[in-house]
Amino acid sequence: MTRFYITTPIYYVNDVPHLGHAYCTVNADAIARWHRLIGDDTLFLTGTDEHGAKVAEAAEEHGVTPREWTDRTSARFSEAWEGLNVSNDDFVRTTETRHYDTVRDFLQKIYDNGFIKKDTYRGLYCVSCEDYYTPDDLNDGMCPVHGRGVVEMEEDNYFFQLSAFQDRLIEWYEKNPDAIRPASKRNEALSFIKGGLKDVSITRTSLSWGVPVPWDDAHVFYVWYDALINYLTALGYGEDPENVATWWPHVHHLIGKEIIRFHCVWWPAMCMAAGVEPPANIFVHGWLLVGGQKLSKSMVDDQGGPVKLTQITPASLTEDFGVDAIRYHLLRNTPLGTDGEFSIEGLTERYNSDLANNLGNLVARVATVVASKCGGTAPAPDPQSPLVAAAAQAVTSASDAWQRFAPHEALEATWRLIGAANAELENTEPWKAEPGTVDDVLGSALEVVRIVALLIAPAMPATSLEIWHRLGLSGSPEDERLPGAADWGNSLAGHDVIKGDPLFPRRKTTP
Ligand code: ME8
């Protein structure tokens, strides 16, 4: 049995989810769905990161306790993911008892192994990053990620001896060249490691909102140090070693590019220190940009005021465009690994061209002509149709692309097949033919629609199901197993094909 364990970062609950979070979560979801579709035993984890100064500050600003605030805001994340039809198997909250237990066991192990020591720490701290910077890291004295001021902090802390892992990390990445993808991000992590690693402060006394340090109750763990461990919390580390052994070798962390250092340097070193194998696969994605700027909760503009990008909540878009249209755009428009510009104009254009004119048009056209020329009953497909090869090519290319974490390529391949079917219909013009003379063409076009429904299932599960039912098929594409189910076959002949409303009514390009 092939196993596949995929995780998203756990999101801070200082504010509500925005489209950038949705980008990562929807990509992870589609990849998880693909793996279920090919029969892998799949585990998909997301969750919320609820400790630290940033969350404590947000709670105070809203006049509630951190606990009340995190309950309220974490729920907004689960609701957003439900609204986007995200199929996570688990949702970890770092305020849960199971997480406290795992953090305690994991860090006690590192402490017992002699990699945690007490010392004094001084540094410049950005509360939005929950991270220290050196003066050289700053842009005009401001945090390089958030553009906000940093504060000078001095604390008596426990330190993790990251420096002790420099050589082992280099060796690990040399032995496992695909552990970080894309390669450019692997090189970035490696050059950071080769540049020399300093020990890191991992506890706080200035803050009580955190996981208590088991061997010293004056301290809580630094938020990043507890957060990373969530990936093992979900597997029951400490409680269920068998489950950890089952899933951990198959882990794939999908993360944004700003948290490479934590995931590709700290986290593998922490694992080594605790006697756990480092994560085998880390995939780094880029940022969604609006007007060239990162979509972020805590950006400030030139005047120091908040940039109103948080107005772009996933729900505001799905209400307007539909869930699957947003999922499709997120997956298709910005390849994983690069930055991409998000705009309503771009979304509308892609909706009209790919969804209304191509997919929607193919489904509507085939059903309409089957109604008028075949009395609504599906004819058999033609085993000699030129679309047979096009379909096989689409299945091969899409499979390969999903495997490489390239949903945009998988969808491109699928849309080439849709294009080929539309072109075939335009060439043969079955709507002009005598009934009974175009069964082969229509049967083949219907077979393409069935294969397309399977191929889009990870990206657009509701649309896929709707098409499945319109083809007169029972059950759901998700119950099928690829690649076998996408072989050119004869499962539709004799079914009643339903016309239905347009799947994606055209939208005006400019308001
Ligand atoms: O960093 N474009 O949480 P966070 C694309 N709690 N993706 C974006 C994005 C954008 N504009 N903005 C955010 C944290 N993301 C920590 C993680 S993990 C142990 C702890 C996505 O709420 C992207 O995946 O700031 C990024 O890495 C993540 O949200 C950061 O979310």
Image (spheres, rainbow, N blue to C red):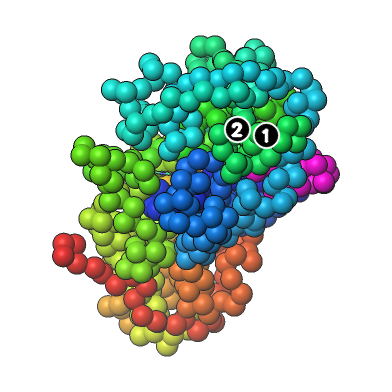
Residue lying at the far left of the rendered structure: 511
The stretch of residues the image draws in magenta is: 229-246
Asked if the residue at tag 1 contacts the one at tag 2, i.e. Cβ–Cβ closer than 8 Å, the answer is yes
Kindly identify the amino acid type of the residue bearing the numbered disc 2: Thr
Q: Position of residue 460 (x, y in %)?
A: 46, 62
List the residue tagged with mark 2.
Answer: 205
Q: Secondary structure at mark 2?
A: loop
Q: CA distance from mark 2 to mark 1?
A: 6 Å
Q: Is residue 223 above or below residue 156?
A: below
Q: Nearer the viewer, residue 102 or 84?
A: 102
Tag 1: Cα neighbours inside 10 Å, few (<14), some, or many (≥20)?
Answer: some
Q: Nearer the viewer, residue 502 or 244?
A: 244
Q: Position of residue 225 (x, y in %)?
A: 61, 34
Q: At x 43% / y 56%, what residue is drawn? A: 62
Answer yes or no: is residue 424 visible. Answer: no
Choose top left, top right, bottom left or bottom right for residue 508: bottom left
Task: Say which mark, if any, is on residue 144.
Answer: none
Mark found first going from the N terminus, 2 or 1: 2
List the residue tagged with mark 1.
Answer: 218
Q: Is residue 416 above or below residue 228?
A: below
Q: Is residue 141 left or right of residue 125?
A: left
Q: Nearer the viewer, residue 322 or 468?
A: 322
Tag 2: Cα neighbours inside 10 Å, few (<14), some, or many (≥20)?
Answer: some
Q: Position of residue 438 (x, y in %)?
A: 39, 75
Answer yes or no: is residue 146 visible. Answer: yes
